[in-house]
Every structure is written in C-alpha cells, then in structure tokens.
Amino acid sequence: MSELDPTQLIQSLLICLSGGIGIYLMMPHRRAFTKPAFAFALGLGLVIFAAIYLAMLGSGPRPIVSRLFFNIFAISSVISAAMMITARDPVHSALWFAVVVLGTSGLFLLAGASFLAAGTVIVYAGAVIVTFLFVIMLAQSDGRAVYDRLAFAPERASLTGFILIWALLIVILSDPMSAFQVRNKADMPTVSGRRLVSGNELVKVRSLNANTPAGQVLRRLNTPQIVLPETLEASPPAGVPEPHVAGLGGALYTSHLISSELVSAILFVALAGAVVIATPRVGGVKS
Amino acid sequence: MPDNVFEMTDLTSYLAIGAMLFGLGAIGFLSRRNLIVMFLSAELMLQGVGLSLVGFGRFHGNWNGQIMTIFILTIAACEAAISLALVVQLFNRAKSLDVSIWQAIREPGLPVTAEPEFEAEPLLADPGPESYPHLTPAGIEPEISLVASGQRAD
C-alpha cells in the first residue's frame, strides 16, 4: 500500500481530537469540573472548529461560488448532526435532523443529483420528521426525563466513534492513485469519458457496438450478449443530452428493475407490518 | 447533470463529510438512551452513506450512486415506519422511552447495565414567565382573614 502523508495524518488527527472532545463535552452528562452550559458551549466551539477544518480539507481548484455553497452545506450539516445527537429534548433532536437533511440535500444538488435532493427533502423533512414529531408528542413526558439528561458512557462512545472516523479519514485522504494500484493516472478516465451513460444508451450500446465507453465497460465485464426487445431501443439520437429525470428513470427501470421491484415489495411489507404492530389489539392484550 | 468538473478532491470532500455524518450517527446510537433519538441517529448514518454514494456516482459519471441512494431512502422510510410503530407499542407498555428498561431481553450471560442516576445532568429551570424567584420564608406567617384579603386597597 501507499505511505501515509504525515500532514494529512496530523490534520485528520486534529479533526478527530477536537471533534471527539467536543462531542464528549456536548453530551448530556454530569461533569465534576464545570457547569453543563459551559461544557456544552466549549464542546460546540470544538465541533465547529472540526467541521470547518473538515470542510476546508479537500479544497481543490473550483469556482468560488460552488466552493462557498459546498462549505455552507457541509459545515451546517456536520454541526447540526452534532447538535442532533446531543440535544436534550427529542423535539429539538428531530428538528436538528431536518437541518441535517437540508444540508445533505444541498450537497446532493451540488453533485448534480437534483431529483434526489428534492426527493430527500420531500421524504425526510416532509414525511419522516413529521412522523417522528407525532410520536414524540404522543410520548411526551413531563419536563425533561432522566434518560434524556444522561448518556451511556459518553467518553467511550466518542472515543469509539472518532477512532472509526479517523480510520475512514486516513483512508479517504491518503493518495488515491497509489491506493488503487490497478490504475495509474493515465488510465483514469477523462472528464468527457466520465460523462453520464444512461440506461437507454447502455441498452443501445450493448446491442450495437462496443466502441463507446459503455461498450468498453460491458466488454470488460464480459457480459453475454442479450437479445433486447425493440421497445427498449427508443432513445434520443446520439449527441443530444437526455433530461436528468429521464436518464435516472431509465437507469432505474432497466438495469435496476429487479431491485426496484424488491424495494417496492419491502415498502408494502413494511406498511402492513407497521399497521399490524401499531394497532392496539382489542381483547386479548397481555400486560 | 451540470457539466462542471468533479475532481478527486471533490470526491474526497464528499467522502469526508459522509464519514463524519456516519460516525456521528454511530456515536449517537451508542450513547443516547432515548429510543427516538437512537432511531434518528440510525437515519443520520444512512444519510452519511447516501452522501458517499452520490459522490462516488458523480465521480464515475453514472447513475448507480443516485439509484442506490434512492433505495436507501426507501429502506429508511420502511425502517422509520416499523420503528415508530414499535416505539409506540413500547411506550404504551412501559410509559417511558428509556431503552434501558428493556434490558431483560438481552443475550443471556451479559451483565446488567448499571443505573448511575446521580450522573444525570441537573435539571435547570427555564428562565421563562413561569419561573419566580424563590424567597426564603422569614418570621411568623401572619393570620390573613377573609375580610382583610378582600379589602385590599390596590
């Protein structure tokens, strides 16, 4: 494997140390040395430092506007995640999770996944958070319960979590070209070679020629030639970019058809299971 | 899909943010005791993984990352439905959202987690309109007749 860059090692260690100590201080727990509010503020400061440092790490040559928006979304989502897991009130926790979802949707949008960004906001912030809030209101305890003001072993949990994050960051930040020893830099596809290959195009290439990038991928995978029905061949002429949702839907319902059917079956089973579990049984209720 | 370049450094930032969200969700799941907060932490871990998948998909220029994230979204919705139904049932039985009540269903041979209630954060009074200054009683409590309290000038 590759040798580690010591500056990146120290950078990631700095991030994990400040983040871990910050999360430990923010967790609800009685500490002998200081008041909870002061410990929370100190920990929040450390976590904000870690989030800003983390967002600044991979700053490549980019346009300033997208860099700015990336930093805003990334820092806000990390800080909201820290606030979410340390909030004393579960209502606040659910609302901070909505902020995390908004931040990650912004990051999805910056990565070009606009349909997914809209879907995440609708599904999470629109449905899941509202359901969570309903349940929290249903199970409202008077005041703040003891179990909300007490965390299981916060020092061991933060140590474990940030050792995991440190390992992940070292793997992510180490030189990727030496990590993937199969490739060298010349073999990395260019930007035009990395353009989107939609499902329709994949089908067409599979039946027609193997000179396009998708065809080369197929030839490398050594898939058997499949005789395709005529209806799948209807696609816009070459050179015309497909609309975003059309390409996503095409890929979803051609190359991932069985998975999407399975997922819809799981959704239905979960619906039935939730109805069965949550409905109070009339009559034979034990305890 | 915008045509701007998505380089290795951009992928690195996406993976780093995704790893951080995943780890924070793991910490929340390990250390919080409220059932609902634990399930929210699990959803946070799913968000981190989805962010990494979208970054990978954008870097390699295909739709697979986004499609996997759509599947994750669906599974997360299923998980939320089932888990909230379970939480409602558990709350109806124990009248509490504490996860340590349900230690009896743990694996045989494991020790009981201690209940260090004295380590809980002290309950701070909210400085709102409901809170009044607490005065220490001094002297003898005067006798207040009904007539005297009704005839107050102010």
Image (cartoon, rainbow, N blue to C red):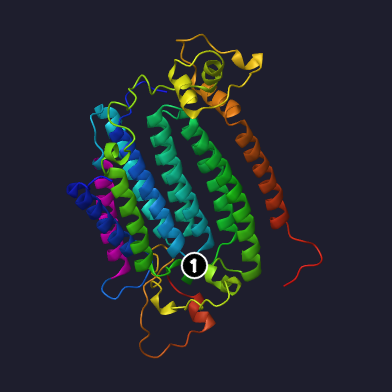
Residue A172: % across, % down: 31, 44
Q: Where, quadrant-wise, is the C terminus of chain A in this rendering?
A: bottom right
Residue A52: % across, % down: 26, 46
Instruction: Name above or below for residue A116 compared with residue A144.
Output: above
Residue furthest out toward the bottom: B140
Whether residue A55 is in magenta: the answer is: yes
Find the magenta span and give its range: A35-56
In the image, A217 versus A127, the foreground residue is A217
Instruction: Name above or below for residue B144 compared with residue A46.
Output: below
In the image, A92 versus B15, the foreground residue is B15
Q: Residues within 10 Å of mark 1 (few under 14, many from 20)?
A: few
**Which residue occupies 34% across, 50% down?**
A168
Q: Amino acid at mark 1?
A: Gly
Residue B6: % across, % down: 33, 28
Q: Is residue B18 visible?
A: yes
In the image, taking residue A235 as reference, residue A162 lies left or right, namely: left
According to the picture, the residue beneath numbered tag 1 turns out to be: A143
